[in-house]
Amino acid sequence: MPIFSLPNFTKLKDTLKHQGLRNKLVKTLIDKGIQDEKVLDSIRKIPRHLFMDSSFGDFAYQDKAFPIAAEQTISQPYTVAFQSELLQLKLGAKVLEIGTGSGYQTAVLLELKAKVYSIERQRELYKKTKLFLSKTRYKPKVLIFGDGYKGLPDEAPFDGIIVTAGAPFVPKPLLSQLKVGGRLVIPIGDSTQIMTLFIRKSEKEFEKHEFGDFRFVPMLENKN
Ligand code: SAH
């Protein structure tokens, strides 16, 4: 199914060449240890080149992060796959994403049949991605310009929360907005981050698991 529903976007093509490059990318991700078939399928389906500036289009299927607007980056496909796998989403899961960025991770969550609530802190990027996604078949429930440190108390609790910027510490509101059994996936650290998974075991108990080092743009504080 084509992702664009409006005629003026038909010039943005997803060609057989792009699909071939995506299949190769998926093989790379499998080699790097990604196993979740649904996550791999969503990466196989989503035309990542359309989420990037056309000047970077040729690089879209390398397993690399790339610049988008407002000095931010679209995360590396391996990182997107790794975080998505850790969330272990069930069909219809309610997910909060901190750092909408290009909307690519948002699209992956939607392909996993989640209901997605996403927050972006850079107004320029928020506007650009909101317009872009509105012209695709990727429809988050809520896309807001706001501060991810606060989460989204009005819509809580969530089955999953994913933070796609490097957090200096775990924001307490995010832990408290998880359902019991819910999972928070967050890279924690300054110049490099440790991918960290919190599972809420009860009202008061959280289990913490740490994975390898990753590198993200920093999670911004106090920015309007
Ligand atoms: N998931 C995105 C990653 C973008 S990079 C993608 O694949 O394209 C991280 C994003 O987090 C940036 O867009 C940045 O502006 C945003 N961000 C940084 N601090 C934030 C905060 N406090 N709340 C919400 N978003 C934030």
Image (cartoon, helix red, strand yellow):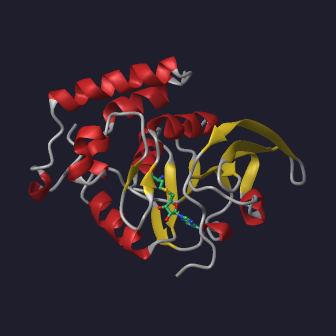
Relative height, residue 59 to residue 23 (above, below): below
Between 193 and 165, the one nearer to me in the picture: 193
Residue 17 location, x and y as percent?
18, 28
Q: Is residue 47 visible?
A: no
Q: Residue at x 40, y 54 (%)?
A: 103
Compared across the picture, whether 219 is left or right of 23 comes to: right
Between 102 and 38, the one nearer to me in the picture: 102
Q: How many marks?
A: 0
Q: Is residue 114 visible?
A: yes
Residue 8 sits in quarter: bottom left
Relative height, residue 211 to residue 95 (above, below): above
Residue 174 sits in quarter: bottom right
Compared across the picture, whether 178 is left or right of 110 comes to: right
Relative height, residue 99 to residue 220 (above, below): above
Q: Quadrant of the N terminus?
A: top left
Q: Residue at x 47, y 47 (%)?
A: 75
Taking the view exactly as shown, the residue that stands out farthest to the right is: 204
Compared across the picture, whether 69 is left or right of 11 comes to: right
Q: Residue at x 90, y 54 (%)?
A: 204
Q: Residue at x 77, y 60 (%)?
A: 176
Taking the view exactly as shown, the residue that stands out farthest to the bottom is: 224
